[in-house]
Image: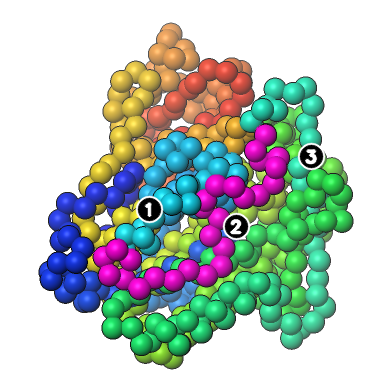
Amino acid sequence: MLPLWVSVVAATALAAPAPGTREQKLQVAQAPNVVLVASDSFDGRLTFQPGSRVVKLPFINFMKAHGTTFLNAYTNSPICCPSRAAMWSGLFTHLTESWNNFKGLDPNYTTWMDVMEKHGYQTQKFGKLDYTSGHHSVSNRVEAWTRDVAFLLRQEGRPVVNLIPDKNRRRVMERDWQNTDKAIDWLRQEAINYTKPFVLYLGLNLPHPYPSPSSGENFGSSTFHTSLYWLEKVAYDVIKIPKWSALSEMHPVDYYSSYTKNCTGNFTKMEIKNIRAFYYAMCAETDAMLGEIILALRKLDLLQKTIVIYTSDHGEMAMEHRQFYKMSMYEASAHVPLLMMGPGIKVNLQVPDFVSLVDIYPTMLGVYGHTCATVYMWRSENNFWELSLSFHHVSPRNQTQVVRTTRPVPLLTRPLLCPDCDPKETTEDLRYRMQKQGLFLFVYKPRAGKLNPKHSLKVTVRPGGACFFFVWLAF
């Protein structure tokens, strides 16, 4: 299997020959092509059981059967521009300093595609990129300055659905289909004639919700829009209605997220189920575009020579925890799909290791022999060194940080939170104490292995304000 390294901040060439040398040209000439399809807002849990039962995704299933699926793949920041900045740079969010959708990479930043082009690859990009600075709304520029105001502003329209009542309407998201067509035309007219390998990137906006201008001045993208053609791909009876906490019982950060996303009003069970169904239908349309690329590669006799990768910048809450959109560290928002197939990649394999989008950078360079070895080490507040698989940050107004551990470590919060606490305290005891201090503890169970209640937790605590702290059980 093609190695997908974890925890890489910068890809450092240690063993790859210098660009332009005879050895390097020969190495690149023998390397496979690469196609990366990156969608927006695709919940990674739909790529494996039980989530995959809710909607028909034939081409994702094709990739699963003919390649490798990463079961624990996560975004480095669950919002478009910061996530994509991490993916294109190989840098964690605190290094790109991309805290919201206005701040990304410098337009001249050297991405993995630039490096591959320098080493002899033909390169092409179509569709949504969204990893450089200067995009999105003016509010993103100033939100850091309004953090301490005594009122909240709704930033999105109320989530709604919109149906095209046509069982034959396949192309709903026209812009994505146009970009898919452009990518296929490029494969047919140009890539097929190249004597050197190529790398193709296709960025899709689906299944991101559509804009809702009818919602008023502060409208966002809160419309889940599809046709009967795609809605028939959804198993309505399998859709679960998520449980919600009462507004009075919600943690302040959760309430803030629900309020600004216009989700604190009343929703019927049918409304919630329809929003989720329409979202899944939009995922089915996304899968079809991925399929068009795969079919084109096969028709051109390029599939067996090409590594195909599918991922997304983040997930979609789809009314879980009384939210839609992303901007949360809950699984629906942070878990992303990551599937790979092609020469050198094992088939029908599910990998439980934790990976994140920064791993795309060194993996791309590894396709043609680059060796990556620079690893980011995260230092705890009491000088305990621990490998951090990822670092997440949402925005200046809603700070959320995640540290994941890969082995049992001492419970680092005891000296910080409760020096005299019973060392045998349970996770719930710790959760209760943290909530009293304005903190919110989440414990994620890794999909691989059994949950061991004896394992320690690793938590970082920083003073000031109500924040989420998501924690992984060491295993």
- Distance, label 3 to label 1, CA atoms, is 37 Å
Where, quadrant-wise, is the C terminus in this rendering?
A: top left
Three-letter code, disc 1: Thr
Magenta region? 117-142
Looking at the rendered structure, the secondary structure element under dot 2 is loop
Going from N to C along the chain, the mark reached first, 2 or 1, is 2
Three-letter code, disc 3: Arg
Q: What residue is rendered at 12% in x and 69% in y?
A: 23
Q: Which residue is mark 1?
A: 110
Question: Can residue 273 be seen from the camera position used here?
Answer: no
How crowded is the residue under tag 3: few (<14 C-alpha within 10 Å), some, or many (20+)? some
Q: Are marks 3 and 2 in contact (CB under 8 Å)?
A: no
Q: Are marks 3 and 1 in contact (CB under 8 Å)?
A: no
Residue 162 badge? none
- Distance, label 2 to label 1, CA atoms, is 25 Å
Residue 164: x %, y % from top left: 80, 75
